Image (cartoon, rainbow, N blue to C red):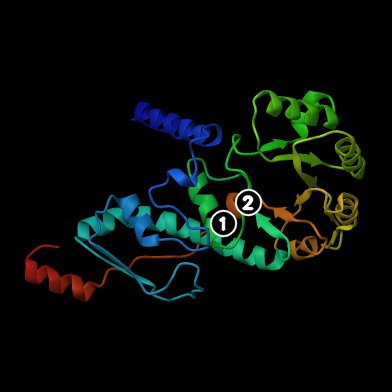
């Protein structure tokens, strides 16, 4: 039992790493593809997950609709054994995705006119699903992995010996490999923002976005000071996309969104989500009626 469990865990970890490293992993390779607008074929997803072991799935609500406690929004039919075996798999996906979509919708509305993004802080093995749920909730997707966008973060800057050295290294690599992709650099101070702006004004660079990390400062009274973030956005003045990160909550996201920043990223959308309370209940009367007629469940 221990050997089997260890083998399974290794497979899960390997799959999660593959999602980060493998450029072949994308929405384009999914059997049920998410469309560009925030809705998706839940029936198709469930049938895909369950290998079509349920006979029929019907929905009375479209995905993305507002629902309230007690609402019955779907119905499934099939053999009782198949229904109860598949129940937890279905609910796990639905509850997690619905929780992510619900939180995203709330934060996206509050962040306007800025766009809300998730991060790569997703459940291992569920990155495509988690990011899909963000789209459903009206958010935008950040990079899928290490292959579709270059992000120069604090550790890279430390290794390179400075923020300009890090940008130069990326520019040289992309040119040598004949690659074209978006490049984002993390800045933590106004001085770093100024460094980046001066360098890119004098040198051709692949840089497309500047992350303004932890420039939202919590105050003792529970409010936040966004003056540094606002100053940074004004310094950049539309030359690059801007992304605010750090101290983003439901309480602070509206104030952050009013600074003029292009994007607001929040890891909480996927790493701290509260699952929606969804359950499946058997129609006892119908089950007994069918059982008497067929002499089986």
Residue 167 is situated, as x and y percent measured from the top left of the image, at 79, 31
**On screen, 24 above or below 175?**
below
Q: Nearer the viewer, residue 89 or 23?
A: 23
Label placed on residue 134: 1
State which quadrant residue 189 falls in. Answer: top right
Identify the residue shown where x is 83% and y is 27%.
165
Quarter of image, res 252: bottom right
What SS does tag 2 mark?
A: loop
Name above or below for residue 89 compared with residue 74: above
Residue 188 in view: yes
Between residue 180 and residue 195, name the one nearer to us: 180
- Per the image, the residue denoted by label 2 is 118
**On screen, 122 above or below 92?**
above
Q: Position of residue 59 (x, y in %)?
A: 36, 70
Q: Does label 1 or label 2 sit earlier along the sequence?
A: 2
Q: Is residue 206 above or below residue 51?
A: above
Q: Position of residue 214 (x, y in %)?
A: 81, 48
Residue 253 located left or right of residue 18: right
């Amino acid at each position: 039992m221990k050997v089997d469990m260890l083998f399974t865990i290794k497979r899960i970890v390997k799959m999660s790493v593959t999602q980060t490293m493998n450029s072949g992993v994308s929405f384009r390779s999914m059997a049920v593809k998410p469309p560009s607008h925030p809705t998706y074929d839940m029936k198709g997803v469930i049938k895909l997950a369950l290998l079509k072991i349920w006979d029929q799935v019907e929905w009375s609500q479209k995905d993305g609709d507002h629902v309230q406690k007690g609402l019955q929004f779907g119905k499934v039919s099939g053999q009782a054994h198949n229904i109860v075996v598949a129940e937890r798999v279905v609910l796990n996906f639905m509850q997690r995705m619905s929780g992510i979509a619900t939180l995203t919708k709330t934060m996206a509305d509050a962040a306007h006119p800025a766009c809300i993004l998730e991060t790569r802080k997703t459940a291992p093995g569920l990155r495509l699903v988690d990011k899909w749920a963000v789209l459903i909730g009206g958010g935008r997707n950040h990079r899928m992995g290490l292959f579709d966008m270059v992000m120069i973060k604090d550790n890279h800057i430390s290794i390179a010996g400075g923020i300009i050295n890090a940008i130069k290294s990326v520019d040289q690599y992309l040119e040598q490999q004949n690659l074209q992709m978006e490049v984002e650099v993390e800045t933590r101070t106004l001085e770093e923002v100024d460094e980046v702006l001066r360098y890119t004004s004098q040198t051709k660079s692949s840089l497309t976005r500047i992350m303004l990390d932890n420039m939202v400062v919590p105050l003792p009274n529970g409010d936040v000071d966004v003056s540094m973030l606002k100053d940074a956005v004004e310094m950049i003045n539309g030359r690059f996309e801007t992304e605010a990160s750090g101290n983003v909550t439901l309480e602070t996201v509206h104030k952050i969104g009013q600074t003029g920043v292009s994007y607001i990223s929040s890891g909480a959308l996927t790493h701290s989500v509260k699952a929606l309370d969804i359950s499946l209940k058997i129609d006892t009367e119908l089950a007994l009626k069918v059982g008497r007629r067929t002499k089986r469940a």
